[in-house]
């Protein structure tokens, strides 16, 4: 039989703990009211102590463990047991403490247990002042008070409860104003009582997720009766969190008279009024969205309506308002509308510098932005923001008659004109295209002096500069060109088994190396096959293909020497054409005696291993260093000995890469390259020393750069160049010297485009000379390039390029402006419609 329930009179309820974190309330209660069960209670409390060690990291699991313990206890014990668990949780996990409190009250109701009123009342206050009661418990406690005490006493106790609960820091329920009205009305009190209690409750809710519904309800209350005297400053510092833009809070402050009190100086938020305004922008410039992200949001109309009433005080303070900060780490938001509103009122705004751009709301903007545009510093910053959002025209098109914007637009156009007048042909062509887009009628009319500068523009100087530096048509790999000509079908990809390059279509493949043709094969794919790929290994060809609807992943393969045996490769991630540093590793994927090394193992004819994902490889001819697609440190690299087949962890990198990078620099491990050139290969345009060729690419260590971020590229033969990080500039992989002299040029690649452009820059000023299309892939091979760029080899095979015609290269090195102008005129005569730019692109 279950034990007799203990006595529940006043003497049976021990005092509540002074320190809830060490509460033994359940055991104290059992000692008083049910001494025979003391051993059971002590054991349960010991189990609770043991579980508390894990509760800080996983409080939900702790509550689940307590539920299992509670089910083994007598029914009359459960309310005190759960209260004790809640006491223990309240100081570090208030939300889960509220769950425990709810279980205690459920146990009392479910099992019809008597309740000692004073204990229930004081226990609720204990939980409330710890912020460990939710909206559901607030409602239940009010109902219990109303059922237990006369209306006047019930209201007094509820008012006390609300004040303790507000001090505990828990977010108030959305219907608190209606609950206070119901309680006060039952006690015969008017709206003045509501305003006092609600003002105190909200004043204690600083930094909590106060619901907008409660704030709007409070506004209605305060419109009838003001909050308590002196509450204005506290109400002005609530800054409700949660998914809100602060509009409801501003409506409540306005109804309570706090906006006017701040404007007059009667209410003085900590940090001053400038700090308050900056705090509003910091709290509400972003809002949380689904799945943990954040999103910019515009300031509410209520803020713009309040600003003129705050302005006199803001101007009197004379403190710059900080409007660009956010409460979310790593986020910043410089709202052009809010900045304009402040400047229009004569309120100074702190300039965060060009690293924090203004945010322009476009068609959703609430302001004309005239005050911002007129600012001598921020007006130019606004031009950059509007320019980034425009499709055609300039910021002048949207913000006419704005001197600051006009000045910044003029500077932008002058810089573009400079590119056309003296940059490389690639930069000049981009600049001319941009000028065509920018010079709409409003811009041309506003910048009257720009006409003469535009009138003398032409491509003669950029063309001369580019031809004198060198163009890709000067270099050729005869064996590869012969393979393309002999393939007999449109090629769809290239794969590397360096020094072998395989070019393949959908029925034939040809492998070539520096000396000539290595092999070829014909094959037949099954009907409906999707993407295909062909790799050369050990004198044979591995042919793989994807299912037509398989998303491009190679699922099936056979060897050309045994076409009847079709199998599913074990590893498929590397079964693809060269298509970037993480898809083929620039072509540095190496041949080994009798096979092909994929960074982990050797694939030999007949093997079914497939190819893995060790995309980065280096070799000194005796060993191969390899790493997976994302290499952050030397620890990511292993070494394979070609003679013994042994693999070990990398202790250092090979060749000249083993030396330490320059002081203050760090290696970009994904851009390094090293290879031993085959016998007979001399005069690589990328340079070599003692038979080794390749490049070290470094950049400043994090926090060490005091200017624009840049790379340093150093070749095995000592050639060296620097290259700045620029939008669309690409990542550098080498320094090339064209036939018959000329400057060192930086070759890069750009992975922000499906065609993976390969730009060539003059490192002297970073100008773009020309751009090719690189790393052929089935994804884009058969698609027309909108810029008609020439198709270039993977970087590893540029070592095999030789001059096409040295005499022609010498003539190009000597081209001057006059010769370039004559070439342009001749090109215009043959180009459709006289389009000089199209003719030049075709010639290059």
Image (cartoon, rainbow, N blue to C red):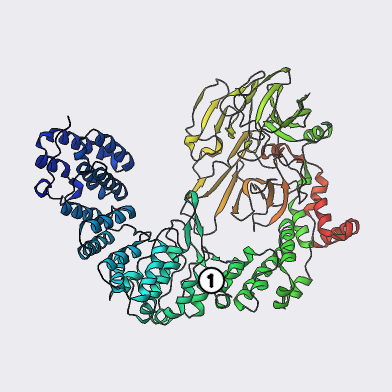
Judge by depth and name the residue closer to the eye, 778 or 118.
118
Q: Where is residue 189 in the image (x, y as percent from the top left)?
A: 26, 71
Rendered location of residue 390, percent (x, y): 66, 65
Q: In which quarter of the image is residue 573?
A: top right
Question: For this view, does 110 lie left or right of residue 373?
Answer: left
Picture mark count: 1
Question: Which image quarter is the N terminus in?
Answer: top left
Q: In the picture shown, does residue 508 fall above or below 806?
A: above
- Residue 31 quadrant: top left
Determine if residue 331 is in view. Answer: no
Position of residue 757 in the picture relative to residue 63 (left or right)? right
- Please state if 66 lies on the left or on the right of 223 as rendered: left
Is residue 656 shown to the viewer in this render? yes
Question: In which quarter of the view is residue 268 placed?
Answer: bottom left
The residue located at (50%, 45%) in the rendering is 661
In this view, 400 is above or below 599:
below
Front residue of this view, candidates 622 and 747 = 747
Q: Disc 1 designates what residue?
A: 337
Q: Using the image as rendered, state which of residue 73 and residue 823 is in the foreground.
A: 73
Residue 368: x %, y % from top left: 59, 75
């Amino acid at each position: 039989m279950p034990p007799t329930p203990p006595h529940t009179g006043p003497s049976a309820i021990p005092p509540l703990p002074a320190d809830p974190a060490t509460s033994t309330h359940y055991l104290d209660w059992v000692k008083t009211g049910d001494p025979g069960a003391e051993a059971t209670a002590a054991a349960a409390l010991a189990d609770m102590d043991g579980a508390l060690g894990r509760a800080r990291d996983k409080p939900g699991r702790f509550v689940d463990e307590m539920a299992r313990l509670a089910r083994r206890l007598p029914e009359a014990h459960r309310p005190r047991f759960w209260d004790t668990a809640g006491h223990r949780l309240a100081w570090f996990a208030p939300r889960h403490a509220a769950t425990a409190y709810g279980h205690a009250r459920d146990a009392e109701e479910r099992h019809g247990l008597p309740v000692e009123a004073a204990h229930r009342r004081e226990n609720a206050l204990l939980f409330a002042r710890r912020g460990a009661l939710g909206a559901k418990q607030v409602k239940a406690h009010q109902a219990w008070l109303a059922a237990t005490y006369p209306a006047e006493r019930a209201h007094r106790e509820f008012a006390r409860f609300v004040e303790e609960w507000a001090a505990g820091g828990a977010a108030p329920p959305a219907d608190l104003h209606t609950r206070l009205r119901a309680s006060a009305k039952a006690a015969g009190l008017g709206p003045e009582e509501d305003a006092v209690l609600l003002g105190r409750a909200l004043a204690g809710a600083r930094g909590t997720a106060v619901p907008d519904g409660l704030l709007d309800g409070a506004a209605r209350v305060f419109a009838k009766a003001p909050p308590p005297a002196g509450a204005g400053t506290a109400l002005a510092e609530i800054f409700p969190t949660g998914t809100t833009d602060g509009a409801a809070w501003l409506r409540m402050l306005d109804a309570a008279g706090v906006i006017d009190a701040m404007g007059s100086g009667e209410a003085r938020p900590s940090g001053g009024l400038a700090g308050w305004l900056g705090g509003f922008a910091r709290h509400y410039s972003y809002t949380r969205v689904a799945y943990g992200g954040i999103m910019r949001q515009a300031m509410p109309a209520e803020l713009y309506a309040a600003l003129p009433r705050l302005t006199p005080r803001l101007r009197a303070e004379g403190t710059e308002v900080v409007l660009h900060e956010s409460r979310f780490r790593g986020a910043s938001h410089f709202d052009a509308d809010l900045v304009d509103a402040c400047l229009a009122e004569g309120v100074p705004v702190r300039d965060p510098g060009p690293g924090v751009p203004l945010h322009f709301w476009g068609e959703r903007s609430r302001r004309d932005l005239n005050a911002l545009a007129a600012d001598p510093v921020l007006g130019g910053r606004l031009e950059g923001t509007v320019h980034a959002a425009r499709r055609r025209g300039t910021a002048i098109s949207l913000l006419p008659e704005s001197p600051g914007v006009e000045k910044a637009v003029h500077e932008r156009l002058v810089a573009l004109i400079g590119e056309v007048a003296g940059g490389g042909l690639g930069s000049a062509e981009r600049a001319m295209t941009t000028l065509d887009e920018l010079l709409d009628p409003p811009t041309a009319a506003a910048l009257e002096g720009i006409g003469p500068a535009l009138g003398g523009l032409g491509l003669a100087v950029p063309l001369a500069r580019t031809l004198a530096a060198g163009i890709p048509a000067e270099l050729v790999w005869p064996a590869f060109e012969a393979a393309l000509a002999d393939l007999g079908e449109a090629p769809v990809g290239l794969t590397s088994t360096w020094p072998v390059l395989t070019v393949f279509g959908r029925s034939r493949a040809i492998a070539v190396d520096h000396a000539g043709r290595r092999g070829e094969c014909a094959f037949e794919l099954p009907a409906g096959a999707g993407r295909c790929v062909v790799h050369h290994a050990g004198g044979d060809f591995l042919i793989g293909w994807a299912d037509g609807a398989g998303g491009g992943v190679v699922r099936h393969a056979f060897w050309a020497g045994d076409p009847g045996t079709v199998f599913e490769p074990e590893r498929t991630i590397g079964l693809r054409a060269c298509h970037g540093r993480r898809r083929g590793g620039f072509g540095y994927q190496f041949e080994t005696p009798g096979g092909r090394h994929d960074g982990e193992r050797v694939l030999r004819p007949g093997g079914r291993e497939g190819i893995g994902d060790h995309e980065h490889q280096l070799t000194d001819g005796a060993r191969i260093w390899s790493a997976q697609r994302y290499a952050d440190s030397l620890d990511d690299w292993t070494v394979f000995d070609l003679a013994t087949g042994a693999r070990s962890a990398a202790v250092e990198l090979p060749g000249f890469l083993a030396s330490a990078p320059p002081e203050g620099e760090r290696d970009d491990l994904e851009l390094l390259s090293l290879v031993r050139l085959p016998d007979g290969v001399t005069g690589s345009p990328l340079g070599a020393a003692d038979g080794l060729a390749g490049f070290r690419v470094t950049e400043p260590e994090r926090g060490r750069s005091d200017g624009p971020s840049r790379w340093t590229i150093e070749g095995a033969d000592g050639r060296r160049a620097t290259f700045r990080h620029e939008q669309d500039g690409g990542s550098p992989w080498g320094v090339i010297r064209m036939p018959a002299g000329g400057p060192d040029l930086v070759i890069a690649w750009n992975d922000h485009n499906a065609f993976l452009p390969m730009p060539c820059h003059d490192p002297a000023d970073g100008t773009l000379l020309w751009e090719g299309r690189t790393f052929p892939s089935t994804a884009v091979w058969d698609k027309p390039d909108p810029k008609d760029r020439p198709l270039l080899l993977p970087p590893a095979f540029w070592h095999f390029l030789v001059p096409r015609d040295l005499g022609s290269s010498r003539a190009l090195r000597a081209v001057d402006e006059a010769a370039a102008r004559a070439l342009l005129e001749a090109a215009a005569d043959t180009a459709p419609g006289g389009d000089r730019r199209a003719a030049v692109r075709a010639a290059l």
